[in-house]
Image (spheres, coloured by chain):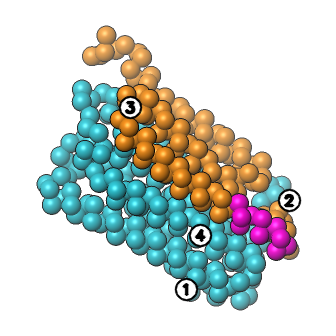
Chain colours: A orange, B cyan
Amino acid sequence: MTTDHAADLGDHAADLDKHVRVYLIVFVALMVLTIVTVAIARVHLPLPIAVSLALLVATIKGSLVACYFMHLVSEKKLILAVLTLTAVFFAVLLALPILTYSDGFGTHP
Amino acid sequence: MDIPYTVEVRRDTGLTNGKIGIWLFLASEVMLFGALFASYILIRTGSPSWPRGDSILNVPLATFNTIVLISSSITMVMAWASLMRRRLGTFRLYMGGTIFLGFVFLTVKYFEYSHKFHDGLFPSSNNFLAIYFTLTGLHMLHVAGGMAVNAYFLGPGSKLYKTNPVWFTNRVENSGLFWHFVDLVWIFLFPTLYLL
């Protein structure tokens, strides 16, 4: 009888202790990056730079949550394949507004 | 009839059915929030002017809520780790902490919303507020849903631990995946709505 992560981690207390240490490091990193996010906003940079930096920090934070709290670093290939497909569709979804403007139709010359 | 592959992994996928199920659900959630983010980009870039979030919204409260939600993610993962160590008492402490932090998050949002309504700022007031209330409102519903599931596992659902601790641990892991996803969405909502 085994479970997905019970099999990966083993039931050894030492393995779990190592993982818990990683969780705590990620937690501290997320806190620091939250302060960085607010600090960037307070500088009042030009909008394109501010947006790029804010999204970069948010992406790093999101990746930390997904990789370590959601265990994606040690997840099976099937899950990664599902998420890759989702990421492609997500990118298309976010590209739609850009395509709307690049067609040159309507009020945009 | 027993539900298959709740504990044993399937040979073809290497996963339990619950794990595949929750990830497929989360994939659909990515598309749901993605559609709203795409709408936000479209409306914002198409608008002749757009207010900075920090000129309308309360950044210190939102920063506090970000810290609260990130803290709830660490308590959630520690709750799962406690079950992996077969420590039900510690699990209850961490899970209780996760639910409490979710409650704190919703309480802060309640005060934020109340303040906006008091100032006559509603979703119908302008496009910025329409996007703000839609995205944060949907996110709040997810927080409330996650709290309800976690409360079930803290209360009546924990009976399963006595008869099948591995299945219970898997259930809590799946609930945790949803909770972390809710945290992840907020990580993007916070800068895009409040700071830019």
Q: Amino acid at mark 4?
A: Met
Judging from the image, mark 1 belongs to the subunit labelled B
Label 2 neighbour load within 10 Å: few <14, some 14-19, many 20+: few
According to the image, label 4 marks what residue?
A: B76
Cα distance between the residues tagged 2 and 1: 33 Å
- Mark 2 vs mark 1: tell me if same chain: yes
Q: What's the residue at 26%, 60% (across, down)?
A: B113
* Residue on which disc 1 sits: B155
Which residue is at a point 67% across and 85% down the rendered structure image?
Answer: B88
**Label located before the other in sequence (2 or 1):** 2
SS class, disc 4:
helix
| Residue for badge 3 | A45
The residue nearer to you, when weighing A98 against A37, is: A37
Q: Amino acid at mark 3?
A: Leu
Residue B93 magenta-highlighted: no
Quarter of the image where one finds residue B117: bottom left
Determine whether the residue tagged by mark 3 lies in a helix, strand or loop. loop
Q: Are discs 4 and 1 located on one and the same chain?
A: yes
In the picture, measured across the screen, residue B135 lies left or right of residue B9, that is: left
**Taken as a whole, is the magenta stretch helix, strand or loop?**
helix
Disc on the earlier residue, 4 or 1 = 4
